[in-house]
Image (tube, grey):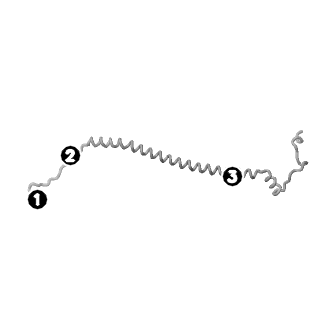
């Protein structure tokens, strides 16, 4: 039901100019200035914690490797001591190579070889 007083006209916004709200810009700058240091601090703290965790894992791995290498060294020292036992060497020389202790006429003394 159209009324006699209501005439539809198109709205002309050609003369409207958008003006920046300086209050809003100040509030935004204040929020950024407040939140940015907090965010950077949180990021720095997180990075430090992750770096500490990474170093702890690396230290633990190196300690395990050092323990393993110490066990290997201990085993190798025992094996070297066992293999270099003079009695064992003499026994294997007799059994496997057929060697015997030299006779006295087979021995050359150092004083005899000098002119």
Mark 2 neighbour class, 10 Å CA radius: few under 14, some 14 to 19, many 20 or more: few
User: Where, quadrant-wise, is the N terminus in this rendering?
Assistant: bottom left
63 left or right, relative to 51: right
Which residue is the site of mark 1?
A: 2
* 8 vs 42, nearest the viewer: 42
Q: Residue at x 56, y 47 (%)?
A: 59
Q: Mark 3 or mark 2, which has the lower sequence index?
A: 2
Q: Is the C terminus in the top left, top right, bottom left or bottom right quadrant?
A: top right
Q: In what element is the residue under mark 2?
A: loop
Mark 1 to mark 3 CA distance (whole Å): 106 Å
In 3D space, how far apart are the residues under numbered discs 3 and 2 (Cα atoms)?
91 Å
In the rendered image, residue 76, in percent from the top left (x then y), is placed at 69, 51
Label 3 or label 2, whichever lies nearer to me, is 3
The percent coordinates of residue 6 (x first, y second) are 11, 55
Farthest bottom residue?
Answer: 1
Q: Residue furthest right?
A: 105
Q: Earlier in the sequence, mark 1 or mark 2?
A: 1
Q: Nearer the viewer, mark 1 or mark 2?
A: 1
Residue at the spot of label 3: 75
User: Neighbour class for label 1 at 10 Å: few (<14), some, many (≥20)?
Assistant: few
C-alpha distance separating marks 1 and 2: 30 Å
Q: Nearer the viewer, residue 103 or 8?
A: 103
In the rendered image, which residue does mark 2 sit on? 16
37 sits to left or right of 82? left
Q: Earlier in the sequence, mark 1 or mark 3?
A: 1
Q: Where residue 63 sits in the image (x, y, percent)?
A: 59, 48
Of circles 1 and 3, the one toward us is: 3
Helix, strand or loop under label 1: loop
Q: Is residue 32 left or right of residue 3?
A: right
Query: At numbered mark 3, what does the secondary structure look like: helix, strand or loop?
Result: helix
> Mark 1 touching mark 3, by CB under 8 A?
no
Which residue is rendered at x = 50% and y = 48% of the image? 53
């Amino acid at each position: 039901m159209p009324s006699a007083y209501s005439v539809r006209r198109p709205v002309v916004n050609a003369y409207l100019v958008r003006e920046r709200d300086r209050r809003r810009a100040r509030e935004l700058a204040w929020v950024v200035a407040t939140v940015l240091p907090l965010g950077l601090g949180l990021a720095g703290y997180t990075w430090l914690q992750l770096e500490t965790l990474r170093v702890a894992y690396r230290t633990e791995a190196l300690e395990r490797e050092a323990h393993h290498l110490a066990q290997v060294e201990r085993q190798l020292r025992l094996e070297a001591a066992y293999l270099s036992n003079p009695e064992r060497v003499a026994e294997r020389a007799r059994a496997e190579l057929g060697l015997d202790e030299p006779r006295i006429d087979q021995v050359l003394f150092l004083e005899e070889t000098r002119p």
